[in-house]
Image (spheres, rainbow, N blue to C red):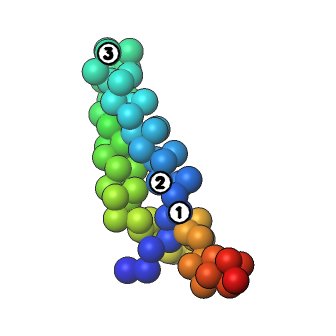
Amino acid sequence: MKQNVGTIDRLLRFALAALIAILFFSHIISGVVAIVLMVFAGIFILTGLVNFCPIYAALGISTKENENENENNSN
């Protein structure tokens, strides 16, 4: 599994998951919508923790910074 989720992307995933959790536990969202959003929040947290998104991989997208480019730019 090649990592394809960058730092900013990870932070956005965690922030969105936190927002969904806050809305759920404060009873602003409920029912089927709340359950679906909580599933998405769980997916956001999981993909943020492992730095891998299967949808990004299928589409050939990566928000991960290239480590070789960062090393070359610092020289």
Q: Secondary structure at mark 1?
A: loop
Q: CA distance from mark 3 to mark 1?
A: 30 Å
Query: Residue at position x 41%, y 68% from top?
Result: 52
**Mark 3: secondary structure:** loop
Comes first in the chain, label 3 or label 1: 1
Residue situated furthest front in the rendering: 75
Of tags 3 and 2, the one toward the viewer is: 2
Quadrant where the image shows the N terminus: bottom left
- Dividing the picture into quadrants, the one containing residue 38 is top left
Crowdedness near tag 3: few (<14), some (14–19) or many (≥20) residues, C-alpha within 10 Å: few
Residue at the spot 68% in from the left edge and 77% down from the top edge: 74
Q: Position of residue 18 (x, y in %)?
A: 38, 34
C-alpha distance separating marks 3 and 2:
24 Å
Looking at the picture, which amino acid does disc 2 mark? Arg
Q: Disc 1 marks which amino acid? A: Gly
Mark carried by residue 10: 2
Q: Are marks 3 and 1 in contact (CB under 8 Å)?
A: no
Amino acid type, residue under disc 3 in the picture: Ser
Left or right relative to 29: residue 9: right
Q: Position of residue 25 (x, y in %)?
A: 28, 21
Give residue 47's quadrant in the image: bottom left
- Residues 48 and 24: in front is 48
Residue 46, placed above or below residue 14: below
User: Residue 26 got which mark?
Assistant: 3
Classify mark 2: residues with Cα within 10 Å, few (<14), some (14-19) or many (20+).
many
The answer to whether the residues at label 1 and label 2 have Cβ atoms under 8 Å apart is yes
Q: Which residue is mark 1?
A: 6
